[in-house]
Amino acid sequence: MMKETSVLCLLFLISLLSCTTNQARLTVSPSSSQFFQGVFVSLSCEEDDSSAGWTLRRNTSKQQRTQCGDGTHRWGTSANLSCDISYLVERDSGVYWCESREGPISNMVNLTVTGGSVILQSPVLPVMEGDDVTLLCKTKTTPSNLPAAFYKDGSLIRKQPTGHMTIQHVSRSDEGLYKCDISGHGESPSSWITVTASPPGTSPLPVVISVGSVCVVVLLVLLVLLVRRCVHRKTEDQNKAAGQEITYSDVTISHRRQQPVKHSRESDSATDHSEMRTEDVSYGEIIIKDKKTKSKEINTVAVYSTVKTKDISYD
């Protein structure tokens, strides 16, 4: 019993620790996966507990796992859980993520900085299956409502006169590499759009809320199991303390054999060489009361004995 209780306690602590470990979420402002050279961008590690020590890192074509504000390979300005890049250049293109001292990392974001005149503004984070997604093809100097052609995996999807295209109720088949082209201005870089499956029968919810709900359920189940185990153990201890003790008693019945009785000659002749046997059966009941318990019930033990009497005539 002690072993099972210890296991439950261990599971409870592990679940509590795993639930209190927050998963950071990297956000980009303005929300886009492509930027013109020379613009401002801010990246933030969003999470509930800042004690985890989240820092922002990136991989580029020139450097690997460099930290925002690092003195050796400085890029951006670090402020709390955010990192600001005041003037983007093409070498800032790469993969960005948040990382804690304990090891967990956030979602990864792929940012592209171009020196060209056309970019495709697309969701920087994965989109949920069933949502609507709007793609915007814009230029650096002219208005953003110019006619544009949109491509997926190198194939033309459609041409839009206003420069934006909306994909309604996206599915996994809409996942792929997108780009756009504005006649007379050029073509944008390509950006990958990721589509995540929506849980069946439920509305799309943030991942943090889903994980939190699972943790709460697990903690409640483990808490109920611990309470039930403690109550069960307490009940068994009480029953053991107030339990009835069973007393066994051996009853030995002994018979004294009578001395042979001398018979007269007349009776001897009548019973000569004969043997008389009588057999009597008696029943007795012994009641043993247990004075150690307060229970109103009285245990009764019935003891049955058979007494055999054998009379043998003697000469």
Image: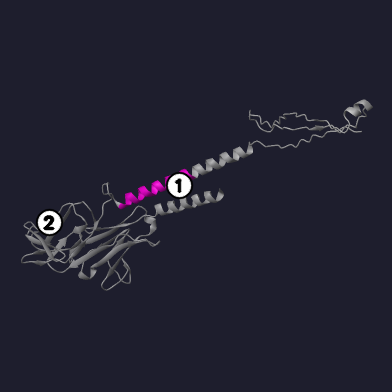
Quarter holding the C terminus is top right
Separation of marks 2 and 1 at Cα, in angstroms: 50 Å
Residue at which label 1 appears: 222
> Residue 19: where, in percent of width, then height?
40, 52
Q: Secondary structure at mark 1?
A: helix
Q: Nearer the viewer, residue 289 or 250?
A: 250
> Residue 43: where, in percent of width, then height?
26, 60
Mark 2 residue crowding within 10 angstroms, few (<14) / some (14–19) / many (20+): some
Does label 2 or label 1 sit earlier along the sequence? 2
Count of labels in the image: 2
How is the protein colored in the picture? one colour
Q: Which mark is residue 241?
A: none
Q: Secondary structure at mark 2?
A: strand
- Looking at the image, residue 81 sits to the left or right of residue 180; the answer is right
- Looking at the image, residue 97 sits to the left or right of residue 168; the answer is right
Which residue is painted at 46% across and 45% down in the image?
A: 223
Q: Which SS type dominates the magenta stretch?
A: helix
Q: Nearer the viewer, residue 223 or 155?
A: 155
Q: Which mark is residue 165?
A: 2
Mark 1 belongs to which amino acid? Answer: Leu
Mark 2 belongs to which amino acid? Answer: Met
> Residue 176: where, in percent of width, then height?
19, 62
Residue 31 visible to an observer of this rendering: no
**Is 212 inside the magenta-drawn segment?**
yes
Q: Which residues are magenta?
A: 207-225
Q: Nearer the viewer, residue 21 or 89?
A: 21
Mark 1 residue crowding within 10 angstroms, few (<14) / some (14–19) / many (20+): some
